Image: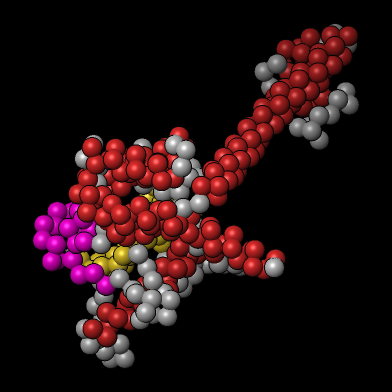
Amino acid sequence: MRKQKKKSRHSKQTHNRQYKDRLWRMIFNNKEDLLQLYNAINRTDYQNPDDLEVNTLEDVLYLSMKNDVSFLVGGTMNLYEHQSTFNPNMPLRGVFYFSRLYEGYVADNNLMIYHEKRVRLPKPKYIVFYNGTKNQPDSMELKLSDCFENTNNDAPCLECTATMLNINYGHNQELMKHCRRLEEYSIFVQCVREYIQSEPSVEDALEKAIDTCIHQDVLADFLKKHRAEVTNMILTTYDKDLYEKTLKEDAREEGREEGLMEGRARGREEGRVEGREEGMEYLNQLNKYLLKSKRYNDLERATEDIEYQKKLLKEFGIESNDTK
């Protein structure tokens, strides 16, 4: 019974992420929007959607290996993955995906990899689009080499780098400005989140979010055409209790991290204050001894010569951590 319960919770977590992942794939399932996204990321200006060759892996062919979107354009092998939770293991998944993609590329182009002549391959580019609830920067690099143990500062023979872009509303505004479709997706997800918090049911929240976005011309064409499918997708994969629990856990974790940082900063400042107070105490003792001994010249020199000051502290047996 316990095993079944655990499996059920895992299933809920997976489903709770799936609606955004599946929605993102639906939106960028056509070449026009995908090319616009590629141009926005790479600052290119490809106009012909037929220049883009989609080669997304399907699990039917690749034994449960399935990526979100992959395609060839402009001499690059592009892998785009959408993530609703932060996952530092995406570079490892990228290695699996790229090996399959290049395997297919070699076969399709009849490349002779056992020949003396070097084969020419499209350059790999790996982008992870993140829109989870945990706060993340606009952009960050995830590297496969960060997973390796005992590297001893030696460069590993294998590397895979994923650029993670935060596509939550308010992030990467320059990118959003150049890709209206991505901006609309970001707005719609934010709208759904807000209405879920304010409306009595998920059904009501979805109806209001979809109506609002259509009225504001946000994914209007897509939502009008796929309204029933989008609604059903979210209703069958969304778990409000789990979502709220995730929000609380993320907030708690961020609070702990901020608390640790504040604690370290406060500790350093307290340490500096204590150090200054301790140093003043030692100098006051030294000054008293020098005045009592009428060593006025030594007192004057000690105020200007730190090394001589340390020498006098040792002479009088006043040894701080700095003079030991």
> Would residue 43 be found to the left or right of residue 80 on screen?
left
Q: Nearer the viewer, residue 162 or 315?
A: 162
- Magenta segment: 30-55
* Residue at horizontal 31 percent and vertical 43 percent from the top: 210
Q: Is residue 208 visible?
A: yes
- Please state the horizontal and vertical placement of residue 31, each as a whole percent of the image: 19, 62
* Residue at horizontal 70 percent and vertical 16 percent from the top: 303
Q: Can residue 180 be seen in this view?
A: no
Q: Nearer the viewer, residue 95 or 135?
A: 135
- Please state the horizontal and vertical placement of residue 234, each as a whole percent of the image: 40, 53
Q: Nearer the viewer, residue 197 or 318?
A: 197
Q: In which quarter of the image is the N terminus?
A: bottom right
Q: In which quarter of the image is the C terminus?
A: top right
- The quarter of the picture where residue 59 lies is bottom left
- Please state the horizontal and vertical placement of residue 121, each as a whole percent of the image: 26, 75
- The quarter of the picture where residue 314 lies is top right
> Would residue 75 be found to the left or right of residue 209 on screen?
left
* Residue at horizontal 48 percent and vertical 65 percent from the top: 144
